[in-house]
Amino acid sequence: MTYVWDQLRAAIPLITHHNAYVMHLLWVSVRVALISTSAALVIGLPIGLTIGLGRFRGRRALQILANASLALPPVVVGVGLLLLLLPQGALGSLRIEFTLRAVYVAQAILALPYIVALTPAAIQALPPGLLAQARALGAGRVQLSVLALREAKVGVIAAVIAALGATISEIGAVVIVGGSFQGSDETLASALMDQFNYTGHDPLATAIALLLLALILVLAGVLTVIQQRTGGIQLRFRTA
Amino acid sequence: MHLIWEELRLALPLIWHGDPYLFSVIWFTLQVAAVATLIATAIGLPIGLALGLGRFPGRALLRGLANASLALPPVLVGAVLYLLMTVEAPLGPLRLIWTRQAVFIGQTILALPFIVALSAAAIQGLPEGLLSQARLLGAGRLQLCTLALREARIGVIAAVIAALGTSLSEVAAVTILGGNIYGYDQTLASATLFEVNGAHYPDAVAIAIVLTVMILVLMCGLGVLQQQGGGIRMRFRSAT
């Protein structure tokens, strides 16, 4: 095990001394997670509310579709998006291929299913009488939405944390649409993989891995605290 | 949309005419998914049963740990395994790095949390009285396990499907441990990445289509199960 210890011993100073490259990666990862998840929230929450509260035909089909979209492989999303963003593609005039902006877009698309699928699940888990009662008392659409969000907030927060977790640790789409340019649009996760492509590996890889682990642990910790407080919401997240 | 149609037009013949490279990748992907899920089930199901049925101290902690392990970024798992398998490392003499065996091991470890955490959750989700009644009537440990598995079978199958889903679409650990070696240890997901990096877009699109079809088939399987079992809440997220 001395080999593993040596790696750790060499890696920790990189973090404690704020190695510029490693800190930049951390900053990019945090930015990608926050921006993409916010975008997904803005787009996904209304859709999730509609599926969760609506009483229209085809609602079940939409819910199944939303659940299925959780399983979309990130590399597939990456390839599809890249073909749109390349200069000859439909969105090619935006000229954002192989930039951090493309990474934001890709990660927002990957975060969207979490919000859209898990929000209705949280709303459907509410006591059956609650929303019906509000409706009977004459709540309007907006009031109903506010009520549902307030009551299902733990589930929605869990969905947001799941989305954050996915955007932090996913690489398939990041590497494809971002091109993984060192120091510009690499995230912690994609930089970690690149370390193995080029150099076998060195303490830098271990330092990046430690930071990534810390970031995920913080998220998992927050989720656990929320679950403990409210007693057993069953939403989990899987990083991709 | 011009570019997408163009790539699709070039990609579809690769699938129709049975491109030998494509089919070798499909074959290896199926092998990985089957072997990893099988071994993970063999190891994980007893653990899941123990967590779901056992009444020992520290059970809640272990369950929390199992849930948290679902959130581990695959790239991190890949990096840690690499650190253990590389030439100078403890498992170095086994010469596993950049072989198919390394891919099998990595995917098995990534599939394990799904089996353990989701089967434990499925057993916990059984009606309160069921298992305590069986205990009162004098069921032995083995009988109790059989009963729990039979009653929670839909949840357990959903766990297996989730495990299959990750091993199909994960790229990070596969790439790090297997080295993404052309025609040797590539899965559909890692081959997509490989072809995009080489700017072979028709091949990338062909592979991505096959991968999407496989995931869709799995999701349909899950959907049918959910319909039959009335609302199992398990979803899976494909991993990078």
Image (cartoon, grey):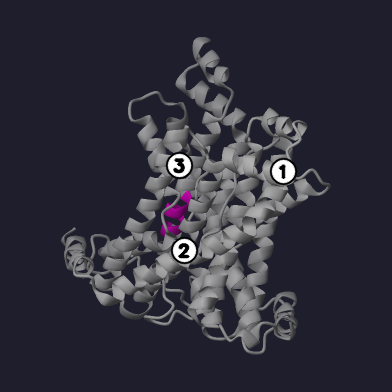
Chain on which label 2 sits? A
Q: Is the residue at mark 3 from the same chain as the one at mark 2?
A: no
Q: Which residue is denoted by mark 1 in the rendering?
A: A53
SS for callout 1? helix
Depth check: give the residue in front, A227 or B236: A227
Q: Earlier in the sequence, mark 1 or mark 2?
A: 2
Depth check: give the residue in front, A102 or B126: A102
SS for callout 3? helix
Find the distance from the CA under tag 1 to the CA under tag 2.
28 Å
Residue type indicated by callout 3: Gly
Q: Taking B57 as reference, is B209 above or below it?
A: below
SS for callout 2? helix
Residue type indicated by callout 1: Leu
Q: Which residue is denoted by mark 3 in the rendering?
A: B44
Measuring from the top left, give residue B106's x and y in whole percent. 42, 59
Q: Taking A115 as reference, is A78 above or below it?
A: below
Residue A33: give its label. Answer: 2
Q: Is residue B11 left or right of residue B127?
A: right
Image quarter of residue B214: bottom right
**Where does the N terminus of chain A fall, quadrant-wise?**
bottom left
| Residue B107, magenta (yes or no) | yes
The magenta segment is: B105-111
